[in-house]
Every structure is written in structure tokens, then in C-alpha cells.
Image (cartoon, rainbow, N blue to C red):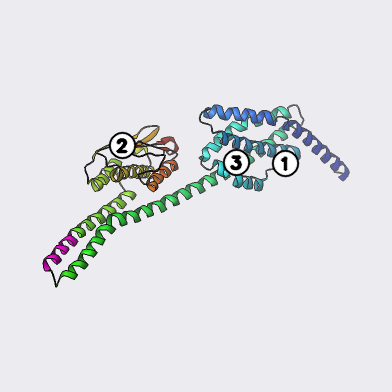
Amino acid sequence: MNPRLRSMVDSSGLATGFLIASAFQAHHDTVLDTFRKRLIGACGPIDVEETLLDQAVIQARQVLADVTESIRTGQVQVDETAIALAWQADAARAMANLHPVESLRAATELFEPVLDAVIETAAGHPDATCIIRTATQALQRSVMTRVRWASEAYVGLLLDRVQQAQLAERRRTARELHDRVGGPASVVTRNLELAKTYADTDRDRSHDKVNVAYQASVQTLEAIRGVTTDLRLEFKFDNLEQALRGFLDVMGEGNATVDLAVSGDEAWVPAEVLAEVFLVAREALRNAFRHSHAHTILSHVDIAPHEIRIWVSDDGVGFDPDHGSSTGGSGLTSMRERTELLGGKLFLHSTPSRGTRIEAFIPRPEFVR
């Protein structure tokens, strides 16, 4: 083709693209309004957080800009670097707590109004098929790039939470060894030292100190067995109810009466999720044993088709949740993090002199096989 003629054709194409892109841009506000309404309709007005809704609309506006630029140039134009920078700066912080499936659900609500606007804009144009194809490709790439960044942000969040949970477990194990083993072991050492001191001057007193050291050594051995049993239960068990009852056997010293029930089919739940459920219930029971001074502790794990519900209630001393927790801040934090990691929520109810109740709700659809 003659270079001058090719230049004229290219200029004509650019001019046409500019006009179509301008016409499509006039639909932006309508598309965004429709997208917002569809999100609210899909999730329900109560379940949509305004901040996340606004963030979704911002992302949709950027997708429209990519589609518009692609129509203008006649080639797919998606600035992936800009997407990455924008997500790292704002969207990751706002939306990292959402499962990536939520990004896909939002995308499905955006595709239809965008394509409707593209088709309406290009209708009757000789190059309508090419315009619609280019716009569709740009829409798909722009959306899926954002979904990829959302997925990476979510995975990073999960890895961070797993690491924090592991660190919390290590700190808890260190406290267990200090509290349950360190005390009796110190008594053994001190009384053996005293027995040695009195060995030549007061044999009866020396003998008494040896007896005390012996009793403390028995307590130390029992504490070590308890800690090792506890750790073993953390990582492997065949049955949730058996694991919890095994833990109660270890922790069962004291005057509290414990009523435990596990209902539902454990086969519905993946083993790794069941292990997390055990750890949440175990921590709630541990707090009740150690801090509530209760006469009765009630515990129930209900595995239903739509969710797992865990609750532990006691008639102990209780406390004011607004002024600190008597149940150990790290233990409550660990339970809440584990529950939220599974997409659930944890609630604490307590009143001074009227006991404490901990409830966790974990939705099964998020992790069903």
C-alpha cells in the first residue's frame, strides 16, 4: 500500500477509535452505578461494607479506563505495572481479608454492564465486531490481572497469619513449660540443696526435704507428661471428640464438672480444618480451667451442613471484657486468629461474677471438599 494512503487509513482508524472511545466513556457513570447496585443485590445491603464497596467501584473505574484506552487505540491496553502499584498502595490493605473468590464474584457483576455498554456504543459501526472483540479482551485481562493481585495478597495474608499462629504456639509452649514444669522443678532443686545442707546437722530435717523433693519430682514428671500429651494432640488425632476428651483427662484436675458434646459428621470437614477446630476448642477449655474458678464448664462442637459452631461456657468469676481479659490475651488472640483464618468469627461474652461464654462460627462452604 502507498505509504501516504496507509497513513490516511491509520489516521482514519485512530479518529474512529477516538470517537467510539469517547462515546463509550459517556457510559462510565451508568456502568459504575449498575455495578454498585448489582454488588449490593448479590451480597445484600447489610452484608456489604461501604469501604469495600467503594474500593470495588474504584477498581471497576480503572477497568473501564483500560477498556476505553483499548477501544481508542484498537489494541488491548492494560497497564499491569499501574495495577500492581495501585493494589500495593491501597487495595491490598482494604481487600486482603477477602477470599479471592469474592473478587471473582465482583468481576461477574462487572462483565455484563461493561459489555452491554460496549455493544450499545459499537452497534451499527462497520468495525463493531473488532471493537467488541478488543474491548472484551481488554476487560478480561484487566479484571484477571486484578484478581491475580488479590489472590497473591490473600495468600500473603494467610502465610503471615500462619507464621503468627506458629509463633504464638511456641510462646504458649514456653509458658506451659515454665508454669507447669518450671515451678515443681525449682522446688526439687531447692529442697535437695537444703537436704544437703542439713545432712550433717539435722538428719530428720534433711530427710523431710528429700521427701518434699521427691513429691515435687513426681509433680514435675506428671507436668512433663501433660505437656507432651498436649503437644501430641495438637498435631495428630483420629477423632475430634476423643482428642478433646483426652485433653480433658490431662487438664481435669480440680473441682469443675465438664460437660462435653460433639455432634455432626466429622467426615464433612477436612483434617487440617478439624485440627484448627480442636485447637480453638482446646484453648477455650484451657482458659475455663485455669482462670474461671468455675463449678461447671459446658462445651459443645456442632458440625452442621453449613457451618461449625464451637461454644464453651462456664459459671465462673467472669470479667469485664472492656477492661481487659482474665482469660489470657494471647490465648484469646490465638483463638480469634485461627477462627478468622477459616473465614469465621469468634465472640466473647462475659460478666463479672456471672461467668464467660466463648462462641466461634466457621462457615463450611469455604473449605468443603
Q: Give amino acid for label 1.
A: Gln
Q: Is residue 204 magenta?
A: yes
- Say how many tags the image has: 3
Would residue 119 be found to the left or right of residue 265 on screen? right
Callout 2, which amino acid?
A: Ser
- Quarter holding the C terminus is top left
Distance Cα–Cα, label 3 vs label 2:
54 Å
| Label 2 SS | loop
Residues under numbered marks 1 and 2 in contact, where contact means CB atoms less than 8 Å apart: no
CA separation, marks 1 and 2? Answer: 70 Å
- Residue most extreme to the front: 201
User: Is 327 in the magenta?
Assistant: no
Residue at the image position 59 percent from the left and 27 percent from the top: 37
Overall secondary structure of the magenta stretch? helix
Q: Nearer the viewer, residue 354 or 118?
A: 354
- What secondary structure is found at the residue carrying circle 3? helix
Please give the residue where the numbered disc 1 appears in the rendered image. Answer: 75
Query: Does residue 250 appear left or right of residue 101 in this picture?
Result: left
Up-down relation of residue 231 to residue 17 (above or below): below
Question: Residue 144's mark?
Answer: 3
Quarter in which the N terminus is drawn: top right
Please tell me whether mark 1 or mark 3 is closer to you in this view. 3
To which residue does mark 2 refer?
A: 353
**Element class at badge 1:** loop
Numbered disc in front, either 1 or 2: 2
Give the extent of the magenta segment.
203-214
